[in-house]
Amino acid sequence: MSDAQLDIQMIAVVTAAACAIPGTFLVLRRMAMMSDAISHSILLGIVIGFFIVESTTSPVLILFAAAVGLLTVMMVEWLQRTGLVREDAAIGIVFPLLFSIGVILISRFAGNVHLDLDAVLLGELAFASFDRFQVNGWDLGPKGLWVMGTILLLNVALVIVFFKELKLATFDPALAASLGFMPGLVHYGLMSMVSVTTVGAFDAVGSILVVALMIGPPAAAYLLTDDLRKMLVLSVAIGAISAVLGYWMAHWLDASIAGAMATMVGISFLTVLLFAPARGLVAQVLRHKRQKLDFAQTMLAIHVMNHEGTAEMRVENRVDGLDEHLHWDTQFTAQIVDLARRHGIVTESNGVLTVTDNGRQRAQAAMVR
Amino acid sequence: MDTVTSIAVLSVLPDILHDLIFDYTLRTVALGAAVIGIVAGALGAFAVLRRQSLVGDAMSHAALPGIGIAYLVTGRKENLVLLTGAAIAGWLATLAVLGIVRRSRVKFDSALGLMLSVFFGFGLMVLTYIQRRPDASQAGLDKFLFGQAATLVQGEVRNMAIAGGLALAVLLFLWKSFKLISFDMDFASSIGYPVRVLDVLLTTLVVVAIVLGLQAVGVVLMSAMIVAPAAAARQWTNRLGVMVLLSAFFGALAGVTGAALSATQRHLPTGPTIVVCVSAIVLISLLLAPNRGLVWAWFARRRKGEELRRTLAAADAAHGGPRILIEENS
């Protein structure tokens, strides 16, 4: 592995981690699409900032872009507050407009400036290693790593310091308001975090794929835990793993690194969706199947118990005729009788079932319920 | 748009109207934009009413891999092939979103954002993979990102009109069912409508509308054409039929105006210009629509205040009691 490759992977991992932190709160607050809106509309901020400072590397760009990110949030909220447009439509109106103005500005004045629309939207991580951060001739590593590293540290620090406020405002905004935690302030703080992180990451992964890194890992982590701390850690881990795997996939296919990272995020999510221990689809199917068998065994115990000691017991509780009495198909009946016998719920003598004490308890418990 | 540009536009208005009729490129582009506006506007009305405004956004992004894969599989670059691929990809992404929401606890917005970005990223990967293959003459694939209305030719506009017309015909044919599932899904289900099938069908029609616009407006901005005309139309009426017609009209108006503006000004890309036009229509509607509009509501509030003040003054006068100083208290 060359130095450049290592650099790129480090930037990718740090970017993924920095995105996963605000992303966790977006997912929990059901505001995932806000990251999509912000990631589009910051283009306008970058363009305006670029016209003012005439450089693509100035940190002032980040300020302008973050300001437009906040402007997006405020415009969406203003539209919503008029009561004329619902939230989803408000988002869908605001960001295309800001984005369009950005594109128009670029194409009207792009003749004499160097601002590549594709690079802003799609990102090009492959060259990130060449842009070095140098002080007095000392090479301190790629600049992208410093930018994203700073943002990551900032995000971590903010979440640690304001953990209680964020948690309360996320899960119970009404209580947060009544306790004086100012959920509105937390909201705008979080949105600032999303904006700054998005702007920082656009250079590396492109503004649209920031959304994948912000939403994907937290959505996967959401299926794995109910604990906010664990969800944050898992999100960062899933994001980082997807970033590294994505890099190598891009390397192997000679394709866009950002695209491959987003694809990997999707694959990670799919894996978790299928195989998460409690909430995964496979676990759901297995649980459903087990519950069906359990329930059927209980039904069998109830049936046998009901006819116990009655005149028709010899007919009703015979193993041969059970399928008809219980309206089950023959194969399923055989499976359930077999299972129930092995679990000590019923016993068989001369082809007739009798319920055990264990089975009797189970049947009674089920009927009381 | 600044005033200088506006004045410039006004002064060339007669030329634009002339060109709209006689200039081949402009006429084609304007017709194409009108078709996109009508179809997206009409179907977008349903998306907005069903709180699925952002589904259009997700679908148009998610269509990207379909374009690349269609090219990889067939080796052909005809629009019909590529756009069919786009439609399939957008459709699959939407089904994935609905599936994730139904089968897991991941919420709608997360599922939407995830599928949007993952499909888009995957599309990007596929397109870059194609570009870097030695045998590929890939030119023309990336125009779907931002759209190139100027490359539309008459035959393509005709195809768009046919596909859009078919989608609208289905909409008209199933009007009652779509209306019902848009306003009361549970009731529709309880009286035996196949809501799942209708839901998927309506979503499919929206996919068709989006794919129609990809070439001219591009992936990134097509979502605005679904949401904005419908949100504007909603302000003027409470009737679904009127809303759909108005929405289609607004879409077409924005499409033609945007196309004409961008054709007469240099460096004014069509897609974004159309979006700015449609946003202007939204703003005007929000402000001026009767009953719901903000200006209207402001006047109504003022009038009510006046009335209240007058009533109170009259009551005071009748009782001869002390006059309440409303102005100072309010």
Image (cartoon, grey):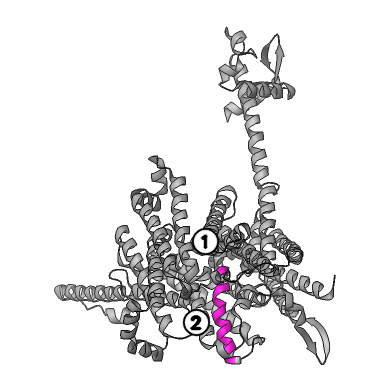
Q: Residue A336 in the image: x percent, y percent? A: 66, 24
Can the viewer see residue A163 in this picture? no
Displayed quadrant of residue A317:
top right
Q: Residue B275 in the image: x percent, y percent? A: 44, 74
**Dot label at residue A104:** 2
Q: Which segment did they paint magenta?
A: A35-52
Chain name for mark 1: B
Q: Residue at x 33, y 68 (%)?
A: B249
Residue A48: say if magenta: yes
Q: Residue at x 59, y 89 (%)?
A: A113
**Depth check, front residue: A145 or B225:** B225
Q: Residue at x 46, y 69 (%)?
A: B224
The N terminus of chain A: image quadrant: bottom right
Q: Residue B107 in the image: x percent, y percent? A: 56, 56
Chain name for mark 2: A
Above or below, comparing residue B75 to residue A126 in the picture: above
| Whole-number angstrom distance, CA of label 2 to CA of label 1 | 26 Å
Can the viewer see residue B182 in this picture? yes
Side of B168 relative to A349 (left or right): left
**Residue type indicated by callout 1:** Leu
Is label 2 in a helix, a strand or a loop? helix
Displayed quadrant of residue A285:
top right
The C terminus of chain A: image quadrant: top right
Direction left: furthest residue: B318
Dominant SS type (magenta): helix
The residue singled out by tag 1 in the image is B83
Displayed quadrant of residue A163:
bottom right
| Within-10-Å neighbours for mark 1: few <14, some 14–19, many 20+ | many
**Residue type indicated by callout 2:** Ile
Side of B16 relative to A339 (left or right): left
